[in-house]
Image (cartoon, rainbow, N blue to C red):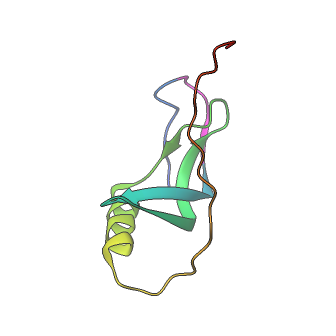
Amino acid sequence: MKKKYGDCYYCGGKVTERKVIVDFRWKGELTVIEDVPAGVCGQCGEKYFTSETSNQLDKLVQSRHKATTISVPVKRFRKTASG
């Protein structure tokens, strides 16, 4: 069932429900969660989650369910002398 999100709080654009990928950090660990229903602004891209979805994300990250593991390169931004 599609939720009604109203207009974007930040830019006033139209918000429609889509499935998104969420990068969720909990206790120093990164978990990537796919197929999360969210309201997404078509103008600026801001994402909105219902309270039910937010609660489910919290429970999923804290659960001990098996997950697929991927390797992700991490680089540190450093300002160069010429920049």
Q: Give residue 27's quadrant in the image.
A: bottom left
Q: Residue furthest top?
A: 82
Q: Position of residue 40 (x, y in %)?
A: 59, 44
- Does the magenta run of residues contain 14? yes
- Quarter holding the N terminus is bottom right
Q: Residue at x 33, y 65 (%)?
A: 58
The mark tally for this picture is: 0
Which residue does the image show at 62% across and 72% down from the upper left? 70
Main SS category, magenta section: loop
Eyeballing the image, is 50 above or below 66?
A: above
Return the residue nearer the eye: 73 or 31: 73
Residue at x-position 38% and y-position 74%? 60
Q: Can the viewer see residue 1?
A: no
Give the image location of residue 63, x and y in percent.
33, 80
Residue at the front extreme?
A: 81
Q: Is residue 42 above or below residue 33?
A: above
Query: Residue 21's spot in the image, x, y percent?
Result: 59, 59
Q: Magenta stretch? A: 11-16
Quadrant of image for the C terminus = top right
Look at the picture and state if 63 lies above or below 44. below
